[in-house]
């Protein structure tokens, strides 16, 4: 092991010495080679595609997320757009009709932008077909009649009830209800549909709408939902942008007193993309301005300050260019993490330039100062960069795309920024020296670090106690932190799509939460049988009020056993057996021509001898009707395989999910389940597993690099102290401020792992050199660079805290907490602990190894 460590140390030393020689003797050649690499990277980026679909950040080949995406595809809701009209109830239908007309005429690239636009249960063009279906449905009460309505159905077949129904039909026809009304009366003169349609309507709705309204209207009458199906998928972002622009133009013409808001995949994608791009660009611009301002105010040199954006751009472009050779596309959230390179890329320039200026201020010549900066401080910088980059690169093996792309982009960006600093800074300093060989190099500002050093040396016990107490307190708080699994909360919080979706869920959802169960197989009858068993299990939970509702195809139609029981009860009623004859007589009494009602007469005549309707025939009957959409929502056939979907509606913890899933596994082992809670759990497990694997690999690599750098337990402990304290403090502060761990801000732990060791490494690296008489000066030099590095990291990545995008905001706050705490423990607690150690051995400081 010692031989391996010695070999690695020697190799790093020779490598840094080579960099110094090349940049000192051949600065132009160095710059030319770097620019050539940059041009190649730009060419690679030209073919790189960016994506914004948040689900593509996670594994989608299994589990709850796989079924969720399958159901979105099967039911078509993955691409639906929702327009929410709000206003006075009397005005909503007319405004909806005008808006629907404009939307149907909307074109994108000369083609219809929307396949369909609907805002009512049955569209006027479908009324004849709807009437024909109603006529068929009322003569099949065994299939569509709820078992509790059997007695009421039979009562309507009594002679006096028939007469009353026909008098009402006469009044409706006299009132001129239109073609639809005449067709309904002809198909169902006894208005038996009133016992069947409410069941069909309520069970077919995904939203809690007014069952008495022909429109998709909320129960309070203030919201009307319009559902539109775009002609192209959401992945076609060029189409999505034009579609959203067209929708915005059409809804601008809605009259006063009625507002229209939108939600849906296309709108969310366009808004999310715009918000993310705007936030990223604003973050980069503001953080770069802060970084450059801090650097210039500290060092008062324009050329090195202007070099920083060049180094950052080089590191970012090279990382993206390399990713373009490996990946077909990059997610825009992964790209957002490249903002971290602004802080990290600046760190290496700060450490090298600070050492160079310190040595020049001490009277050394330019060559010796640059050699010490590149070779000596460069050794610490090299170790710091690799301990930051390797934990990120270790995430590349993850099957979670969010972690894999993040690790690749940031890890490569860190390494490229390091070498950009090594190759660009020395030629620039050589040019500056040649331009002004007699320039003065005044001492650099201590930024209050001299007083801080004295405090840590005079009160090491007090500072150590306060530090340990703070870590202990925050560790206790960290135990109360919870996981945020709702992906909705990671979206832009004030976007129209987000707010509209919230209103839909608040006013129109049957319940706050849902779980979907899929029963699948090749035989429809068997699938329906097993589905009925699952629905019966769920019904037990509903009766105990652990579920709000259970919706599935069985909510719309009866199974074979239920049909048989309905028929047996109907046959026991004389009015049912004599229904055909009584209807004929009633039609005569009402002056109707019986020849106009052949379906009603023959259908009622078959009731006495009817049998159960086979499931395949029942499904076909319903699917071919204007209400066929409900079948597609509950039952899907793909490649000869049936997928029956059962939705369980519940409120929070009232539904014991684990117990239900256990009973479901025993009853239907092949059934699949999905829902927000299950997806959250799956994603959390995927991220946690991949994260811990990468964290462990990265931790081992960091430990090895620290062993190579220090060859002592004291140096390793000094480097890891800020890491441990920073992570604990970050989690504790997040819990204390009400924040939660989510899929995005968990990545900050990797940042703390790499950067936290950097802060302790630089401070200890300088304090172990020479004797104790100059320890304060060396601390100030290293501490100034560490302090500026922390500030630039907070400016570069922590500025995301103020964005409207939930995912990025949580990343920013986690970074601010973690980096701030890590810098504190590196600059304050670590010198105090080293002072305590030195006081126990007053004659020695850590010797240079």
Image (spheres, grey):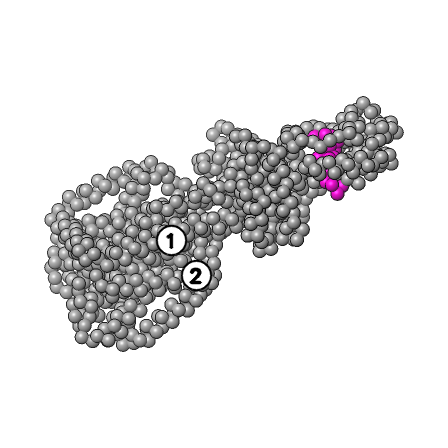
Determine which residue is flagged by label 2: 734
Q: Position of residue 374 (x, y in %)?
A: 17, 55
The answer to whether any part of residue 799 appears in the image is no
Q: Residues within 10 Å of mark 1 (few under 14, many from 20)?
A: some
Majority secondary structure of the magenta segment? helix
Residue at image coords 11%, 49%: 25
Q: Position of residue 47 (x, y in %)?
A: 33, 36
The quadrant of the image that shows the N terminus is bottom left
| Above or below for 714 versus 676 | below
| Above or below for 736 versus 465 | above
Position of 556 compared to 490: left or right?
right
The quadrant of the image that shows the C terminus is bottom left
Residue at image coords 37%, 42%: 330
Position of 128 compared to 284: left or right?
right
* Farthest-out residue, right: 589
| Above or below for 164 versus 499 | above
Please tell me whether mark 2 sits on a helix, a strand or a loop: helix
The picture quadrant where one finds residue 621 is top right
Q: Which mark is residue 172?
A: none
Q: Position of residue 762 (x, y in %)?
A: 24, 61
The picture quadrant where one finds residue 832 is bottom left
Determine which residue is flagged by label 1: 692
Q: Residues within 10 Å of mark 2 (few under 14, many from 20)?
A: many
Residue at image coords 40%, 46%: 400
| Above or below for 735 versus 841 | above
Please tell me whether mark 1 sits on a helix, a strand or a loop: helix
Quick one: 544 or 229, which is closer to the camera?
544
Is 145 colored magenta in this rendering? yes
Task: Report the magenta residues as a range.
Answer: 133-149
Distance Cα–Cα, label 2 vs label 1 = 20 Å
């Amino acid at each position: 092991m010692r031989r391996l460590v010695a070999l690695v140390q020697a190799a790093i030393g020779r490598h840094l010495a080579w960099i110094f020689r090349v940049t000192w003797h051949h600065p132009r050649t160095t710059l030319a080679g770097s620019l050539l690499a940059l041009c190649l990277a730009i060419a690679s980026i030209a073919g790189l595609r960016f994506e914004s679909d948040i689900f593509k950040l996670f594994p989608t080949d299994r589990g709850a997320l796989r079924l969720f995406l399958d159901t979105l595809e099967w039911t078509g809701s993955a691409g639906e757009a929702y327009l929410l009209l709000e206003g006075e109830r009397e005005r909503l239908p007319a405004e909806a009709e005008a808006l629907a007309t404009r939307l149907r005429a909307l074109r994108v690239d000369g083609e219809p932008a929307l396949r369909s636009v609907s805002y009512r249960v049955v569209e006027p063009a479908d009324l004849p077909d709807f009437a024909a279906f109603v006529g068929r449905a009322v003569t099949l009460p065994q299939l569509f009649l709820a078992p509790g309505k059997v007695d009421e159905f039979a009562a309507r077949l009594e002679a006096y009830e028939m007469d009353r129904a026909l008098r009402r039909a006469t009044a409706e026809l006299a009132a001129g209800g239109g073609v639809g009304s005449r067709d309904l009366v002809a198909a169902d003169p006894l208005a038996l549909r009133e016992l069947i349609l409410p069941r069909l309507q309520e069970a077919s709705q995904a939203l809690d709408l007014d069952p008495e309204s022909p429109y998709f209207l909320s129960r309070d009458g203030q919201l009307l939902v319009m559902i539109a199906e775009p002609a192209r998928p959401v992945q076609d972002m060029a189409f999505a942008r034009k579609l959203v622009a067209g929708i915005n133009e059409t809804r601008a013409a809605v009259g006063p007193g009625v507002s229209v808001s939108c939600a849906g995949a296309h709108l969310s994608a366009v808004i999310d993309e715009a918000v993310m791009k705007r936030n990223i660009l604003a973050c980069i611009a503001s953080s770069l301005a802060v970084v450059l301002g801090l650097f210039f105010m500290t060092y008062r040199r324009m050329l090195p300050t202007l070099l920083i954006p060049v180094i950052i751009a080089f590191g970012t472009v090279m990382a993206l260019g390399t990713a373009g050779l490996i990946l077909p596309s990059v997610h825009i959230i992964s790209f957002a993490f490249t903002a971290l390179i602004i802080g990290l890329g600046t760190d290496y320039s700060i450490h090298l330039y600070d050492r160079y200026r310190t040595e020049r201020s001490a009277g050394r010549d330019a060559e010796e100062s640059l050699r010490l900066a590149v070779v000596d401080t460069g050794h610490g910088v090299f170790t710091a960069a690799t301990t930051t980059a390797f934990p990120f690169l270790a995430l590349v093996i993850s099957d979670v795309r969010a972690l894999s792309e993040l690790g690749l982009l940031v890890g490569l960006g860190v390494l490229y920024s390091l070498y950009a600093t090594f190759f660009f800074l020395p030629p620039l300093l050589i040019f500056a020296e040649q331009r002004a060989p007699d320039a003065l190099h005044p001492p650099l500002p201590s930024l209050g670090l001299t007083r801080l050093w004295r405090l840590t040396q005079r009160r090491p016990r007090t500072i150590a106690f306060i530090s340990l107490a703070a870590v202990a307190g925050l560790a206790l708080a960290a135990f109360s932190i919870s996981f945020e699994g709702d992906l909705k909360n990671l979206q832009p919080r004030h976007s129209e799509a987000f707010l509209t979706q919230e209103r839909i869920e608040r006013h129109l959802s049957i319940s706050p939460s849902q779980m979907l169960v899929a029963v699948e197989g090749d035989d429809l009858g068997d699938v329906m049988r097993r589905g009925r068993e699952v629905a019966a299990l769920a019904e037990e939970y509903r009766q105990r009020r652990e579920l709000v509702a259970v919706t599935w195809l069985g909510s719309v139609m009866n199974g074979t056993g239920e049909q048989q029981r309905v028929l047996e009860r109907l046959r026991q009623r004389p009015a049912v057996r004599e229904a055909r004859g009584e209807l004929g007589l009633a039609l005569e009494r009402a002056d109707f021509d019986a020849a106009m009602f052949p379906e009603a007469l023959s259908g009622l005549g078959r009731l006495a001898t009817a049998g159960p309707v086979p499931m395949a025939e029942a499904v076909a009957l319903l699917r071919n009707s204007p209400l066929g959409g409900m079948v597609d929502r509950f039952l899907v056939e793909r490649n000869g395989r049936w997928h029956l979907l059962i939705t369980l509606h519940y409120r929070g913890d009232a539904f014991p999910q684990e117990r239900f899933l256990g009973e479901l596994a025993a009853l239907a082992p092949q059934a699949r389940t999905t829902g927000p809670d299950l997806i959250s759990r799956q994603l959390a497990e995927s991220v946690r597993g991949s994260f811990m694997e990468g964290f462990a690999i990265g931790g081992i690599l960091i430990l090895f690099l620290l062993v190579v750098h220090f060859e002592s337990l004291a140096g390793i402990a000094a480097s890891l102290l800020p890491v441990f304290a920073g992570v604990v403090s970050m989690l504790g502060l997040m819990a204390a401020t009400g924040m939660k761990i989510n899929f995005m801000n968990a990545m900050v732990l990797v940042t703390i792992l790499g950067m936290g060791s950097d802060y302790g490494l630089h401070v200890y690296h300088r304090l172990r050199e020479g004797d104790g008489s100059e320890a304060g000066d060396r601390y100030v030099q290293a501490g100034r660079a560490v302090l500026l590095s922390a500030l630039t990291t907070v400016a570069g990545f922590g500025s995301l805290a103020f964005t409207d995008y939930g995912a990025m905001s949580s990343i920013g706050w986690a970074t601010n907490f973690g980096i701030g705490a890590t810098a504190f423990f590196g600059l304050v607690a670590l010198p105090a602990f080293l002072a305590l150690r030195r006081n126990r051995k007053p004659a020695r400081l850590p010797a240079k190894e």
